[in-house]
Each structure stands twice: as C-alpha cells, then as structure tokens.
Amino acid sequence: MNYIFYFLIVVSIVAGAVNGKLDDVVNAILTGAELSVKVAFSLIGIMAFWLGIMKIAEKCGLVAFIAKLLKPISKRLFNELPEDSPAIADVAMSFSANALGLANAATPIGIKAMKEMQEENIDKSSASNSMCTFLAMSTAGFQLIPATVIAILIGIGYKNPTEIIAPTLLVTTIAFVSAVIIAKIFQQFWAPQKAINTSTSETRGED
C-alpha cells in the first residue's frame, strides 16, 4: 500500500506540474491533511463511547447473555466447536462490535476468537470450517449502527449523517447472509475434519 500511495502522489504532482496546476495539487494536499486531522479527532469521542459501552457490557455479563442467546445459532454455524468453547463468546462479542460499526474494536476480539478456534482445530496446517465461517461473517461486517461512518460524516460537516443507517443495514445484511450461505455451501465439498481423521486412523489400523 505504501508503494501505491507513493505512486499516486508522484503521478499527481507530475500531472499537476505538466498541466500548470501544481498550486492546486499542493492546496489539495494541505486541505486533505487538515480535514483528515479533523475527522480523526471527531472519531475519538464516539469510538471512546462505544468502546466503553462494550467494556461495560463485558463486565456486567451482557456479552455472556448474548452468547447464550445466540447459542442455538452458534451450534449450527460452528458445529465443530464444543458447546462450552470460549470462542463462542468471543464470536458473539465480535459480532456485537461489528453490529455497532466498531470495526477497530471487533478486530482484536476476532483475532482472539481465531486463536481459540485454532487451539481446537484438529488440522493445524489449515483453517477449520468454523474459522472460515467466522472469517466470512467478519468480512461481511453486518452493521446495525454504522457508528464510525456516522462519526466521519459528522466530522466533515454532513447535515444528516444518520440517513446512512438504513442503506448500510440493508447492504450489510445481504452481504452477511450471503457470506454465511456461501461458506456453508463450500463446506459441503470437504468432509469434516473428525471424519477425515477417523478414516485415516482406520486406514492405518488396517495397515
């Protein structure tokens, strides 16, 4: 990415110099830098607020409650994991953070969930079906309240930042459902790991 951005900057400066628009290019760079600082500061408040809400939810047991609430769904989506797996709670917490539009908060939680899934993964050299399903869910990024996007719109002075909620909810819902369905369809082409290990053991026993 560094090379790409460097290339874009160099091309912009050269094109501006060739067309006699170098002053416009420099002004655009300075204006963009100033705007990025304003947006970054506008994100601090709302990110701190929602991260605090997530921490309170974790401490008061709300995350555990959500995990129990999602348990019937989790059993079907992550049927390779034990019912008492700590990864289930982390998946619920990551899902909650994504739903609130806190991708930055969901990332470390998702990494923790992946590590716990890897510990229970039979084949350490490849991702399990549960890991692939969770990755698809996280990539789709279902958002109930796009808090980060709203904060950015507020930072740039948009008059009605909340109007992004409805289209974001529609698009991310379709993406989320599609990602889960596609992940489950592709899982049908590979036998479960337990079955593979069982058949391998039986083969070795016959030998």
Image (cartoon, rainbow, N blue to C red):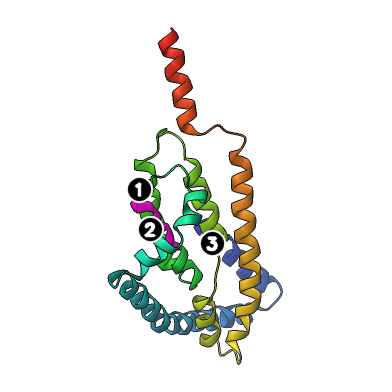
The circle drawn on residue 116 is 1
User: In the picture shown, does residue 198 fall above or below 130?
Assistant: above
In the picture of the structure, the residue carrying the numbered disc 2 is 90
Where residue 107 sits: x, y (%)?
Answer: 42, 61
| Amino acid at dot 1 | Glu
Q: Nearer the viewer, mark 3 or mark 1?
A: 1
Q: Quadrant of residue 149?
A: bottom right
Residues at marks 1 and 2 touching, judged by CB atoms closer than 8 Å:
yes
Q: Position of residue 87 (x, y in %)?
A: 37, 52
Percent x, y for residue 51?
37, 74
Q: Residues within 10 Å of mark 2 (few under 14, many from 20)?
A: many
* Callout 2 secondary element: helix
**Extent of the magenta region:** 83-94
Q: Of the numbered discs in the image, which one, if any, rests on residue 6?
A: 3
Q: Amino acid at mark 2?
A: Asp
How many residues crowd around disc 3 within 10 Å: few (fewer than 14), some, or many (20 or more)?
A: few
Kindly state the secondary structure of the residue where label 3 is placed.
helix
Which secondary structure dominates the residues rendered in magenta?
Answer: helix
Q: Is residue 89 magenta?
A: yes
User: Hey, what amino acid is under mark 3?
Assistant: Tyr
SS type, badge 1: helix
Q: Say which of 203 and 162 sits in front.
A: 203
* Farthest bottom residue in view: 159
Mark closest to the chain's N terminus, 1 or 2: 2
Question: Residue 31 or 120: which is nearer the viewer?
Answer: 120
Measure the C-alpha gap from mark 1 to mark 2. 9 Å
